[in-house]
Image (spheres, rainbow, N blue to C red):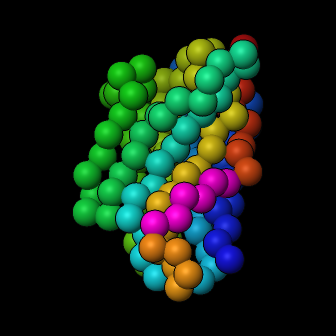
Amino acid sequence: QVQLVESGGGLVQPGGSLRLSCAASGSILSIYAMNWYRQGPGKQRELVAGITSGGSTNYADSVKGRFTISRHHAQMTVYLQMNSLKPEDTAVYFCNARIMTMTELNGDYWGQGTQVTVSS
């Protein structure tokens, strides 16, 4: 059984910062990649940022230069540092990971989501 637990969401004013965390736990043999997605009101879920096991990163154009994804391998945790937040960043942010377990070579797992609201 694998769990992804996000934390760090909340209410912040435009221009402010937040740091999201996502910790993976369970019968994990290896984590290939960890990603952050978001789903704003009335919008489809979109990829915000991703990081591979080798440390390669990718970002949505809308967050480049403002968001930074990082990863702590030993703690099986991924972070999303969000700076210069805008109202359009308001969304539920979901952690996603591709994980190898004893019974699944390449499983796709999701966290429960954490709300980020950017408003004055």
Is residue 38 visible in this depiction of the protein? yes
Give the residue at x 33% y 57%.
52
Q: In which quarter of the view is residue 24 placed?
A: bottom right
Give the residue at x 59% y 65%.
23
Magenta span has 98? no
Is residue 90 visible in this depiction of the protein? no
- Return the x and y of residue 17 as percentages of the image width and height: 55, 34
Magenta span has 108? yes
In the displayed structure, 103 sits above or below 69; it is: below
Segment tinted magenta in the rendering: 106-111
- Return the x and y of residue 51 as percentages of the image width and height: 36, 52
In the displayed structure, 7 sits above or below 104; it is: above
Give the residue at x 73% y 19%.
41
Q: Which of 79 and 1 is in front in this view?
A: 1
- Return the x and y of residue 82 as percentages of the image width and height: 50, 36
Q: Nearer the viewer, residue 94 or 69?
A: 94
